[in-house]
Amino acid sequence: MDQPTPFNDRLVLAPTHDHMADKYDDLDTEFEPQLFSSLERHLPRHLLDASRDTKHERMQQILRRYSTKEECHRRQGLEKYRQKIASDYQRIFRDPYTLNPKIFFQPTFLEAFRAKGKNLVTSIRSIMSEPVPGVYTFNMLNLNFCEKLIHEVKHFDAWARNTDSSILRPNTGNGYGVSLDDIGMKATLDKLMEDYISLISRVLFPDVGGCSLDSRHGYVLQYGKDKAIKEVVSDLHVDDSEVTLHVCLGNQFAGGELVFGGQRCKDHVNDGTHIEKEFDYLLPVGGQAIIHRGCRLYGAKPIKFGHRYNFLMWFKSSVFRELQAHDKGFKDFCDECQSQKSARRNEWVAAKKRELGL
């Protein structure tokens, strides 16, 4: 069992931007080398100038808190699986594998990121709509690119069937998904997180680690009346992420609205005491993105006819998770925590009134 982390060795939420992080690509390590370079900027000041080996060992200790032995073995098997795909699978498009902003994004999205400094915050907010409190929508992906991504995923599915190759599905609730890292889109997704989503999250979700995203999981799911999708609207859930991005890739369909409830910390994910009776609905539109905290309860209504392809990304912050492990108080983002906090405050006030004979 890990020893408690000394207070002065804990990660800090705000990164040290002027620190030049070491490279870890040459090390035989169980985690992505890029993750260490990103995480290093959140080490306390007295560790920033330590040797690379010291920093690496400290960061591995932190990351292992959130990674089981089974996950380590799974990562090793996943690497072999991806190497086989890279050697055998013939891609049909080039565009998804290198992030070219003019091909990927709609003009309004690109224009927002041309601003600098403080103007960038205003510019990012200017393209956002907030139809549900804490849930933002904006036009993001070019429809032509969406079409190519759908065809690439279909082509990969067909290749797997024709070659009797198994597909490791990215989501246990859907048997028709493809992890985009598996088919070679790692560089694309890394750049998307670093150059775009990290900036958006810094503006919209600083309270849940949006300032320190350092890992992600990206995949495409296919939904349809004949596909493996849970039909129950009340089957709300939260993601294992700090920030979740959905982009509707389109195709012809009806239904499939996203359903939103409140927010939950990990201690109250399954606590239904204050589950909201009213939910908000959003209908996905091709090329449009929806972004929200991963702790937000949500689900999807059934597809009435046709098929919908959805591009999803989960973004995580090791820094936020490490800090959360030492935070035993009420969570500001959790509706259940705040409800309990309010109830305790009311109990205290009522007790004081009785004490004073009021």
Image (spheres, grey):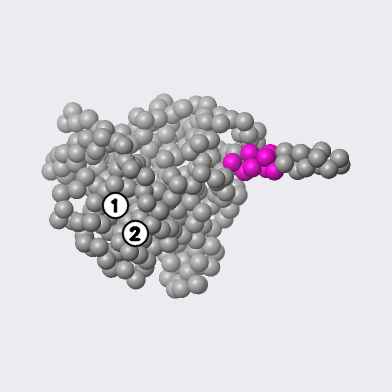
Q: Is residue 82 left or right of residue 309?
A: left
Mark 1 residue type: Met
Query: Judging from the image, what secondary structure is the residue with disc 2 in?
Result: loop
- In which quarter of the view is residue 86 placed? top left
Question: Which residue does the image show at 50% across and 26% down from the upper left?
Answer: 231
Image location of residue 236, percent across then percent down: 52, 33
Question: Which residue does the image show at 30% across and 64% down from the upper left?
Answer: 48
Main SS of residues in magenta:
helix
Q: Which residue is mark 2?
A: 43
Question: Would residue 245 be seen by someone viewing this image from the given angle?
Answer: no
Q: Quadrant of the C terminus?
A: top right
Q: Which residue is mark 1?
A: 59
In the image, which residues are magenta?
A: 337-346
Image location of residue 73, percent across then percent down: 22, 35
- In which quarter of the view is residue 177 placed? top left
Q: Residue furthest toward the left?
A: 87
Image location of residue 195, percent across then percent down: 36, 62
Question: Which residue does the image show at 13% across and 43% down from the upper left?
Answer: 87
- In which quarter of the view is residue 233 placed? top right
Q: Is residue 307 left or right of residue 90?
A: right
Observer-nearest of 96 and 29: 29
Query: Judging from the image, what secondary structure is the residue with disc 1 in?
Result: helix
Question: Which residue does the image show at 43% across and 67% down from the upper left?
Answer: 113
